[in-house]
Image (cartoon, helix red, strand yellow):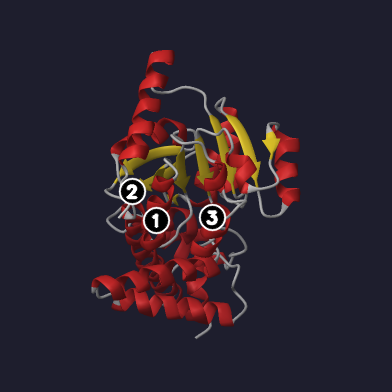
Amino acid sequence: MVNHSISVTLVRAKCADRALVTGKTVSMSSVAFIGLGVMGTPMARHLAANGHQVTVYNRTPEKALAWVALYGHRAAPTPREAAEGAEFVFLCVGNDNDVRDVVYGMDGALAGADAGAVLIDHTTASAEVAKELAEAAAEFGVGFVDAPVSGGQAGAENGQLTIMCGADDEAFYELAKPVMASYAKASALMGHAGSGQLTKMVNQILIAGVVQGLAEGLNFAMKAGLDPEQVAEVVKYGAAQSWQLENRGSTMVKGEFDFGFAVEWMRKDLGIVLDEANRNGARLPVTALIDQFYAQVIARGGRRWDTSSLIQLLAND
């Protein structure tokens, strides 16, 4: 087991230095942002808009250069060079292996990160990789926060994400929190490293169940001869109200799915959930079934459709 005391001491010292210099814990920082997908692009933009000095890296260099052309700042050719001199190194990539690819190795972020920096991973990944990263970061004197987000592309665009965090010392989270506030409406420290990812798994379990219930309810309304949009408008004021009903009810009825959170990514997330459930013994019979429903959507060509496309399986029956 790695002793985290060195990284904790360095990060706490940095907290104290920033408070002495600025009179508060919120100040403009030098940050690296690695991963400019549909979430990372606007998140990095919010950091820049809030006055932070941003260096971006993307596996496809053209995306990083396009981001710089729009928002200024700097692009780096490797994660290592992006991380050099950064107080905070943010990741928002695809999966566990993508995280490892940008963090480890001669050109990885940890090779370039300064001792006392904080590595924040916004990727929805496994709790196991979060614990692994915390251990690896500690060896470099770097703090680590696993910080998956909820709120989708719209939340990222509007700076209204919810962030679920895990860290082996609260100092890591407290230093990162005001910087993450650039694109978050709420964040919380849920426990040790990996706890943020475990909380995100709960989030995905709940979403899967809600979307399937909404699909069945709206399909039932149509089969019963009701106006499904009118039904959705009425029930949203009662106990059935949900974000999915408010934001996806109408498009589900219209059969519009070419936007939003892609089915292939939901399957990735549910795969992480089901793997963790196998480890901890949690029974997830409905979640496992919905995962198979999403597999059927993909088989019908809906890999990039929004997760609300579950209703297609019912409408076509």
Q: Nearer the viewer, residue 271 or 264?
A: 271
Dot 1: few (<14), some (14–19), or many (≥20) neighbours within 10 Å? many
The reply to whether callout 1 and callout 2 are in contact (CB within 8 Å) is yes
Residue 178 seen from this side: yes
Q: Is residue 242 left or right of residue 69?
A: left
**Badge nearest the viewer, 1 or 2:** 1
Label 3 SS = loop
Q: Which residue is mark 1?
A: 130
For the point 61% across and 45% down, the residue is: 80
Q: Separation of disc 3 and disc 1 at Cα?
A: 13 Å
| Residue 227 in picture, x, y percent from top left | 46, 66
Q: Earlier in the sequence, mark 3 or mark 1?
A: 3
The amino acid type, in three-letter code, at marker 1 is: Ala
Q: Which residue is mark 2?
A: 166
Q: Which residue is mark 3?
A: 104
Dot 3: few (<14), some (14–19), or many (≥20) neighbours within 10 Å? some
Q: Separation of disc 1 and disc 2 at Cα?
A: 8 Å
Dot 2: few (<14), some (14–19), or many (≥20) neighbours within 10 Å? many
| Residue 25 in picture, x, y percent from top left | 39, 22
| Residue 287 in picture, x, y percent from top left | 35, 73
The amino acid type, in three-letter code, at marker 2 is: Gly
Q: Earlier in the sequence, mark 3 or mark 2?
A: 3
